[in-house]
Image (cartoon, rainbow, N blue to C red):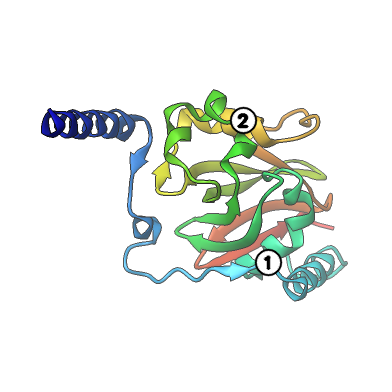
Amino acid sequence: MRAFGCLVMVVLAAAAGWFLRDRFNFRDRDMLTAGDTAVVWEPITTEGAERARKSIENLGTPGAPVFTSLRPGDVSSYIFVALARQLPPSAEKIESAVIGDRLHVRASVRPSDFGGAGALGPLAGFLGERETMELGGYFHVIRPGLAEFRVTDLRLGTFTVPTNLIPRLIRSFSKGARPEGVSDDGLPLVVPAYLADVRIAGGRVVLYRNPL
């Protein structure tokens, strides 16, 4: 009977794994790298924020080039104050990297910030007290002074969250009113009015300005 009980537990575990495979894809973390290119994760720093601030301010001066190229860590450091309000309150050890044409931000968070089983469903039972959350996406300027970081990939621990569930998880930890025009999968960001576009390529984040 003891052997039969162990067999039942193995079958149940396999069935749960099969169910979750379809809803939350199991993927190795290295699969998020761009081919064989090494991904460099950069920490949030005050120095990086200052470098980005100066570059962005210079972009808005008469006679400045129409674009400026920044490191992902500097951009993330600069927007951290705004983005931090949109991240789970327990987020710490925040880093960023460019992977392909997306900016990825990862942090250690408490899954309880997402509202538990109500938002996470069966996934909640497979997560620890703290897990690594990774957001991948791109920037979109909605209108002068307002942009958003659109989340196209979201991972918790070793689980990849299905795209159609990303808006629900964002709503579960986002605080305050969302400005008009922000996408369901977007995190709003206040930006200078002269910022026209943000593109990601070659491991850099490129910011373009409107003609002055």
Residue positioned 60% across, 45% down in the render: 110
The percent position of residue 105, horizontal first and vertical second, equals 58, 55
Farthest residue to the top: give it. 118
| Relative horizontal placement of residue 147, taking residue 116 as reference (left or right) | right
- Seen in the picture, residue 204 relative to 164 is either above or below; the reply is below
As drawn, the label of residue 44 is: 1
As drawn, the label of residue 115 is: 2
Report how far apart the C-alphas of labels 1 and 2 lie in the structure.
Answer: 26 Å
The percent position of residue 87, horizontal first and vertical second, equals 68, 45
- Mark 1 / mark 2, whichever is N-terminal: 1
126 or 53: nearer the viewer = 126
> In terms of secondary structure, where does tag 1 sit?
loop
- Seen in the picture, residue 210 relative to 143 is either above or below; the reply is below
Residue positioned 38% across, 56% down in the render: 29
The quadrant in which the N terminus is found is top left
As drawn, the label of residue 180 is: none
Q: Quadrant of residue 198?
A: bottom right
| Relative horizontal placement of residue 7, taking residue 205 as reference (left or right) | left
The percent position of residue 93, horizontal first and vertical second, equals 63, 62
> In terms of secondary structure, where does tag 2 sit?
loop
